[in-house]
Image (spheres, grey):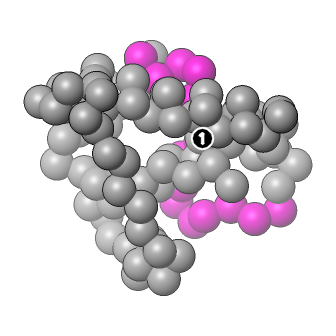
Amino acid sequence: MYKFNKIISILASILTFFIVYGSPVQAAAIEVPRISNHAAKQMVDDPAVIFIDVRSAKSYWRSTSKITRAVREDSNAVVQWTAKYTKDKTLIFYCT
């Protein structure tokens, strides 16, 4: 049940991000696209792409695997960090 609640929390944060970030689409119509691991690996070195790790702090610090150049952001504080990222960047969020 904890994982389900965490996933819902992260998805809600991502929706909030798109709403705050200025998406012209209504919140109910937002569909978050997914990419494969292979596609993500090809984008890791692209300076126009920012990987944002939205795992809990506990999960993040306990993990031995992290994406190179990824930035950790608190999924419960989306409003506080959205302004750091410009609209000309591709943001890829991950949580597992």
**Which residue has dot 1 on it?**
54
State the quadrant of the C terminus.
bottom right
Residue toward you, 33 or 61: 33
Residue toward you, 96 or 11: 11
Q: Give the range drawn in magenta.
A: 64-79
Q: Please identify the residue farthest to the left as the structure is shown.
A: 24
Residue 31, position as x, y percentages in the image: 32, 45
Q: In which quarter of the image is residue 55?
A: top right
Q: Residue at x 20, y 26 (%)?
A: 26
Q: Which residue is drawn at 60% across and 64% down?
A: 67
Is residue 66 visible in this depiction of the protein? yes
Residue toward you, 5 or 93: 5
Residue 12, position as x, y percentages in the image: 50, 27
Characterize the magenta stretch by its predominant secondary structure.
loop
Q: Residue at x 19, y 41 (%)?
A: 87
Q: Say what amino acid the circle numbered 1 marks.
A: Val
Dot 1 falls on a residue whose secondary structure is: loop
Residue 62, position as x, y percentages in the image: 87, 49
Residue 75 relative to residue 43: left or right:
right
Asked if the magenta segment contains residue 67, the reply would be yes
Asked if the magenta segment contains residue 46, the reply would be no
Q: In this view, does 40 lie above or below 77?
A: below
Q: In this view, does 16 lie above or below 55?
A: above
Q: Please identify the residue farthest to the right as the structure is shown.
A: 62
